[in-house]
Each structure stands twice: as C-alpha cells, then as structure tokens.
C-alpha cells in the first residue's frame, strides 16, 4: 500500500463546512458516513474528493438513518468516526444517537442547523438547541455539545470533539448553523496526525489471542442492570463538567450581560460595543460547551443589580438554562428571531435598551 | 454467567464448541433459531475464524444472539443490522462480518438498509431467518406472513388485498449486482440443516475471496407465534411456506442464473 503523505500546519481561507472536513482528515478520522443535506453537503463533497488521496474512508449512505448506524458499527469496531447533517437529517439520526450514547461509543456528530420545524428553510437557525443538549432521542442521555462561532473554531472543535468523545466514551456534537457552514474565513489548520488514536480494548475487533468476547449493546433487560447503566452515565455527565468552556467579556462592571452562543454571540459582541458607546455598561457571555452548560459561571455573575439578555436564533431555548442558572437572582430577558432569520445589532440594542 | 442445564458430572457426551457459549437458549421449544445459531457457529468453529469474526445481532427473538454466539458482536437498532455491519466491515475489511436478522428486522423496518448494503456489494454474510411472524413482540403479522395466516394483528388471516402479499425480498435482492450468492434454505429437517450448513460454509469462503454480499434466507418456524406444536410447524413449512418461499439456490456464482438446488436434490 502506498504511504500517503501527512500534511503539515497550514493557513487557508476556507468555508466552514470544508474546513471541518479538512480538520477531520487532519484529526485522523478513520471513517465518515453521511448523506447530503443543505446547508452541510460540502462536508461530504469535500471528503469524497479528498479522501481517495488522503487517509481514512468516506461512504455516502442511503439515508441519515443508515449513516448513523454505520457510525455505530464503525465506532463499535474501534474506529474514529464522524457524521454530519443538518436539522431534519439530525432528527432522523436520533434513534441511532440514543443507541450510541447508551452503548457508550465515541464519535463526532455535526449539525449545521437550519430553520425549522419541518422541512423549514435552509437558512441558519439555532432551533436545535434543545435537541442537541437535552439528549434528542429517547431515554436519559446527553451529548457533549460544542458551539463554534467561527470557522476557526469549527476546525478546533473537530479535534476537541474527537478528544472529548474518546475520553468519555460519549458521542460529541458540534452544533453550528448554516451561516457558519457556508461562510469563508481564514483558518489555521493543525498538522495531520497530531491527535493519536488507540483502538480501545472494548471494541469488537475479533477475539484475538482468545480474549473474552466483546459485545456492543444498549440492551439490558433487567431493570436493576439498566438502572446501573443509567447511574454510570449520569456519573459520567457529572465528570464532564470539568470540560466546561465559556467566554466572557466586560462583565465585571456590566449592568446587563448579553448571553448568546454560536453565531448570535458574534452579533452580541457588536451590540455590547454599540451599547458601551451609548454609555450602557454591557458585557457578553458565551457558552462554548452547551452541554455541559456553564451554569455555575452564569450563577456567579447573577445578582440584583444586573440583568441578562439572552439572544438566540430560535423561540427561546438556551434562555431556559440561563434562567435555571440565574435562579431568580437577576432579571432574564430574551430576544430571538426564528425560521432562518438572523438578528441585526440595532434590533438587539433596541431590545437591550427597553429592558434597562 | 455460565449456566448449565445438566451438571457437568452428569454429561454423557459433550459436543461443546468454543464458538457457542454454554448459556442455554431462551428460544421456545421447537424454534428454529437454536439450530440456525448452531450451524452458523459450527461453520465459524470449523473454519477456525472465531477471532476474526464480528457478528451483528438484530432486534427480534435473536436480539440476545451474542449470549450464545461466542464471537465479538454488536447489537443493532431494529432494522439497521446491515448498516451496522457495513460500518464494521468498512473499517475492518480483513475480518469476517455477518448479520443475523429476522423477517421483521430485515424485510420491513430494515428494507432500505438491506437493499442498499447489498447493492453496494458489502462483503458480508446476511443470515435472514424467515419465520413469517414477529416472534419477540408476541406473534404479529410480518412482511413474510402467509396469505390467510392468522397472527395477533391479522386475526382473521392475512388479507392480501389490504395487507399486501408476503414479501419475497430474497428474490428481490438477488437482482442486485452486489449480491454474489443468494440462497434459500431451511431448518425443518436434518437433511435441510446439512444443506444450510454447506451454504454458510460457501458464504464465508466467498467473503474471504471478497466476492460481495452473500445472502442466506433460512425458512424457519415459530411454534409459539403460529400457535402450533413444533411437529405441526414442520408440515406448515413444507405445505404452506414452501409455496411462497421454495428452498434452493437463487443466485449462484459462475453459473447460469436462477439454478435451483433443493435439499432433496442435494441428497
């Protein structure tokens, strides 16, 4: 077999979807299974073009249902696996994701989300927040959810997503949106082969050297056993709290803090700047891990002399988690646009002024 | 975990092979699954490929197949065994991969995964156990339920006008170029079991040669679901199921298409 040259560090101008695909190859992804859907099809397109000359394998599945189950099989066989889709496709994958979470298979899922519900629109949305952070499928489980706000972070979180997924034996999801997937920015790509991968000993790779049988399953018919599995999962989710990431700016003296993730957080930075120009002491807080959620950090910021304005491209989803974290210590307001609409800084600023 | 029905000191003879665990089958008396499990595992034992084989269990009566089959296994979601097997085989192309699926799993909810895995010519063995009923959930109508057959969801008999005909998925997938070896066998007589075993042996040989998908339908029975004695199920297989699902090869490599070899002819 010919040896394929590994690519070194590189700076390029890239579209979000293509940058993620390139990052996946560089992160040592063994296999990708996916199905086309706007606005993320470039991931599959890029990989089908690149992978024949690079490392790994890519397969276009007959549906998102098949794709996620191929991910299950390959992850269970010890490979570093990824799939990506957009909102309706991610809905189709939910059954498989629940099985993957229960069988504790590490893998990376990407949702380049679009406006819904239903077939909705192909324009960007954050309407899948609940689906991503609350489990999404049946049963008590969570994904590790990373929310990038730039093309660079889409690259970085591919590496981080694989790392966390493998560390915790848990599926990780990058929750992006159609705008991040489609826009071009300068990115620094890490060197290929910089994320080592060891085939885990629980994988179904064949009973070499007469080792005992490995079984990948989510079926435990005795409720006592299934409860034990659940307790184990819940303990794992608690342990994950050490991975919480967030970003805050100008919060020390802030009378109002704008809380937003992903694309909205970039807009909110501009809003905070405009507010400061007007003499309003505004700060920003951006959860980077949506699950585990930075509840404690938000709680620390809460107090009677400070208000929160949560801005999302949905009908108000993360705001519920912010309210839980604030726990009545501050007023929490919400501004959202839906159905693929992106809020403009001036409309958010107007809302901000109205709540002070 | 190891349970014995017979105390080891009382065993008169032991035909234990390392590919079958000592866990007693949970299958109903007279059910064909036990025999199908056994011949499949005998072949893996005889070929000496236990450490190179990964199986995929379905949702259905054989959901616990991995309790009995002592090879690495993955339990798939209902109908997705062929997709899971694809995922395994693609990342471990040098290993032997098989799926073991019932009629509801393979021919109803998993039709798309089945057809497309075979269309891609995935180099795997698909074992399709057709007993014309949903056994695990308590005897509901399956895609392969016979016309007029009474089940808990066709209590007046399968009415083909409103419920459709039994699905001949094996004939359907035989048309696909990715299907290399397609055969329908059964487990209703010792003779039939011997022929089935030969078919499984061939399928693993073809997989070693990377020929494409091998598909073995096994016409089986369900005494509990059919509400018959095991003996009566044998006559039902011969007199009713074989009308729709005649045993024999459907697609064999390097031969004229649609050559039929039945258990009777073989002997």
Image: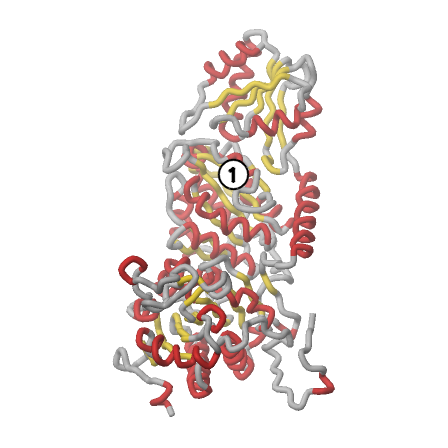
At numbered mark 1, what does the secondary structure look like: helix, strand or loop? helix
Identified at 68% across, 28% down, the residue is A297
For the point 56% across and 59% down, the residue is: A76
Residue under the image location 62 percent in, 22 percent down: A249
In the image, A231 versus B45, the foreground residue is: A231
Please give the count of numbered marks on the rendered protein: 1
Q: Is residue A170 left or right of residue A29?
A: right
- Chain letter behind tag 1: A
Relative depth, front residue between A351 and A74 = A351
Q: Which residue is mark 1?
A: A131
- Indicate the position of residue A128 as horizontal and vertical percent values: 49, 35
Residue A183 appears in the figure: no
On the rendered structure, is B200 left or right of A284? left
Circle 1 packing at 10 Å, graded few (<14), some (14-19), many (20+), is some
Report the front residue among B238 and B56.
B238
| Relative to A314, residue B222 above or below | below
Percent x, y for residue B222?
A: 46, 72
Name, please, the residue furthest toward the top. Answer: A279
Compared across the picture, whether A205 is left or right of A241 comes to left
Pick out the residue farthest to the bottom: B267
Most distant residue in the front direction: B156
Residue at 34% x, 70% y: name it.
Answer: B170
**Quick check: A319 above or below A331?**
below
Place of residue A311 in the rendered image (x, y in percent of width and height, measured from the top left): 52, 23
Q: Report the coloring of the rendering.
A: secondary structure
Q: Is residue B43 above or below residue A115?
A: below
Q: Nearer the viewer, residue B108 or A59?
A: B108
Image quadrant holding the C terminus of chain A, namely: top right
- x, y percent for residue B228: 46, 74
């Amino acid at each position: 077999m010919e040896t394929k040259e590994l690519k070194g560090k590189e700076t390029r101008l890239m579209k979000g979807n293509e940058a993620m695909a390139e990052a996946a190859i560089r992160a040592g992804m063994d296999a990708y299974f996916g199905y086309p859907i706007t606005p993320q099809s470039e991931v599959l397109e890029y990989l089908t073009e690149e992978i024949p000359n690079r490392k790994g394998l890519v397969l276009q599945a007959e549906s998102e249902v098949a794709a996620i189950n191929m991910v299950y099989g390959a992850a269970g066989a010890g490979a570093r696996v990824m799939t990506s889709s957009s909102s309706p496709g991610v809905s189709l994958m939910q059954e498989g994701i629940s099985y993957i979470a229960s069988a504790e298979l590490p893998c990376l899922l990407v949702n380049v989300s679009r406006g819904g519900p239903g077939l909705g629109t192909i324009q960007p949305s954050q309407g899948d927040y609940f689906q991503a952070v609350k489990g999404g499928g049946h049963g008590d489980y969570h994904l590790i959810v990373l929310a990038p706000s730039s093309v660079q972070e889409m690259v970085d979180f591919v590496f981080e997503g694989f790392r966390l997924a493998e560390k915790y034996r848990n599926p990780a999801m990058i929750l992006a949106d159609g705008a991040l997937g489609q826009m071009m920015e300068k990115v620094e790509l890490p060197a290929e082969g910089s994320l080592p991968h060891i085939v885990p000993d629980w994988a179904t790779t064949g009973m070499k050297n007469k080792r005992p049988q490995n079984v990948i399953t989510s079926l435990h018919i005795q409720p006592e056993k299934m409860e034990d599995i659940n307790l184990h999962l819940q303990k794992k989710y608690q342990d994950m709290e050490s991975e919480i990431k967030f970003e805050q700016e100008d919060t020390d003296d802030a009378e109002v803090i704008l809380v937003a993730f992903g694309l909205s957080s970039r807009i909110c930075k501009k809003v905070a700047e405009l507010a400061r120009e007007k003499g309003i002491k505004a700060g920003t807080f951006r959860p980077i891990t949506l699950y585990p959620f930075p509840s404690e950090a938000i709680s620390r910021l809460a107090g009677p002399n400070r208000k929160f304005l949560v801005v999302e491209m949905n009908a108000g989803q993360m705001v519920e988690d912010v309210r839980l974290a604030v726990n009545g210590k501050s007023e929490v307001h919400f501004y959202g646009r839906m159905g693929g609409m992106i809020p403009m800084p001036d409309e958010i600023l107007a809302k901000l002024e109205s709540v002070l | 975990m190891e349970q014995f029905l017979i105390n080891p000191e009382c065993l008169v003879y032991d035909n234990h092979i390392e590919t079958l665990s000592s866990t007693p089958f949970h299958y109903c008396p007279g059910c064909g699954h036990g025999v199908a499990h056994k011949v499949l595992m005998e072949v893996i034992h005889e070929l000496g490929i236990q450490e190179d084989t990964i199986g995929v269990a379905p949702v259905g009566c054989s959901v616990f197949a991995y309790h009995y089959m002592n090879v690495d296994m993955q339990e798939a979601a209902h109908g997705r065994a062929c997709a899971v097997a694809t995922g395994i085989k693609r990342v471990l192309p040098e290993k032997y991969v098989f799926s073991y699926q019932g009629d509801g799993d393979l021919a109803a909810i998993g039709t798309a995964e089945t057809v497309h895995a075979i269309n891609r010519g995935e180099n795997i063995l698909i074992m399709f156990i057709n007993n014309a009923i949903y056994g695990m959930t308590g005897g509901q109508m399956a895609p392969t339920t016979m016309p007029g057959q009474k089940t808990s969801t066709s209590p007046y008999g399968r009415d083909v006008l409103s419920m459709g005909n039994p699905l001949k998925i094996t004939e359907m997938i035989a048309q696909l170029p990715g299907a290399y070896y397609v055969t329908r066998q059964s487990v209703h007589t010792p003779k039939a079991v011997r022929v089935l075993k030969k078919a499984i042996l061939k399928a693993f040989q073809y997989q070693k040669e990377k020929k494409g998908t091998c598909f073995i339908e096994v016409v089986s029975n369900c005494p509990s679901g059919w509400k018959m004695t095991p003996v009566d199920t044998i006559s039902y297989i011969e007199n009713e199921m074989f009308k729709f699902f005649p045993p024999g090869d459907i697609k064999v490599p390097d031969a004229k298409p649609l050559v039929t070899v039945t258990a009777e002819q073989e002997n």
